[in-house]
Amino acid sequence: PSDISSEPRRPSRKASSTTNIVDDLTSIFGGASSSGEFQDVEGEIEERRRVRLDRHQRTQERAAKALAEKNERDRQTQRDRMRETCKFCGSTHYSLLLAVMSLYLKMPLL
């Protein structure tokens, strides 16, 4: 029986080197930090900074819009599921389920 710990772990090394490359490129070209905040780059000309800031803001806006749309689709799916007919009695039980879900989510579903 061979010792498993003595075998090389190529995938983790590859992922690590990929991460290092991304970190290096981010530091060179001034990409967004992992927190998503815009970072100033020392020595960068104002025009390039402005272009980068505009791109960052558009990206943030698209991400916020996509998240809002996803949340609305999720809420609509929940509403649709609550409207389904009960297999036991044939009722929709919509009002009760809506009240419970509103309390659970701490927000109105309509």
Image (cartoon, grey):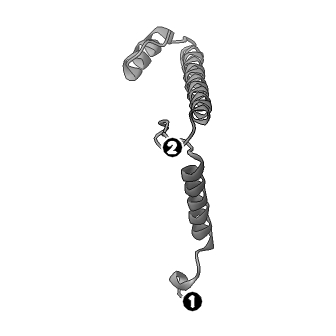
Instruction: Quote the CA–CA distance across marks 2 and 1.
Output: 50 Å
Label at residue 41: 2
Q: What residue is drawn where x is 57% and y is 58%? A: 19
Count of numbered marks = 2
Foreground mark, 2 or 1? 2
On the image, the x and y values in percent for residue 85 come to: 59, 15
In the rendered view, tell whether residue 18 sits above or below residue 67: below
Q: Quadrant of residue 82?
A: top right
In the rendered view, tell whether residue 14 sits above or below residue 64: below
Quarter of the rendering occupied by the N terminus: bottom right
Badge 2 crowding class, 10 Å Cα cut-off, few under 14, some 14 to 19, many 20 or more, is some
Q: Nearer the viewer, residue 1 or 89?
A: 1
Tell me the amino acid under the disc marked 1: Ser
Q: What residue is drawn where x is 54% and y is 52%? A: 27
* Secondary-structure class at tag 1: loop
Q: What residue is drawn where x is 55% and y is 12%? A: 92
Q: Nearer the viewer, residue 94 or 87?
A: 94
Q: Earlier in the sequence, mark 2 or mark 1?
A: 1
Residue at the spot of label 1: 2
Q: Quadrant of residue 76?
A: top right
On the image, the x and y values in percent for residue 50 come to: 58, 30
* Secondary-structure class at tag 2: loop
Q: Which residue extends farthest bottom?
A: 1
Q: What residue is drawn where x is 55% and y is 16%? A: 79
On the image, the x and y values in percent for residue 41 come to: 51, 43
Q: Quadrant of residue 55?
A: top right
Badge 1 crowding class, 10 Å Cα cut-off, few under 14, some 14 to 19, many 20 or more, is few
In the rendered view, tell whether residue 84 sits above or below residue 58: above
Label at residue 105: none
Q: Nearer the viewer, residue 32 or 73?
A: 32
Tell me the amino acid under the disc marked 2: Val
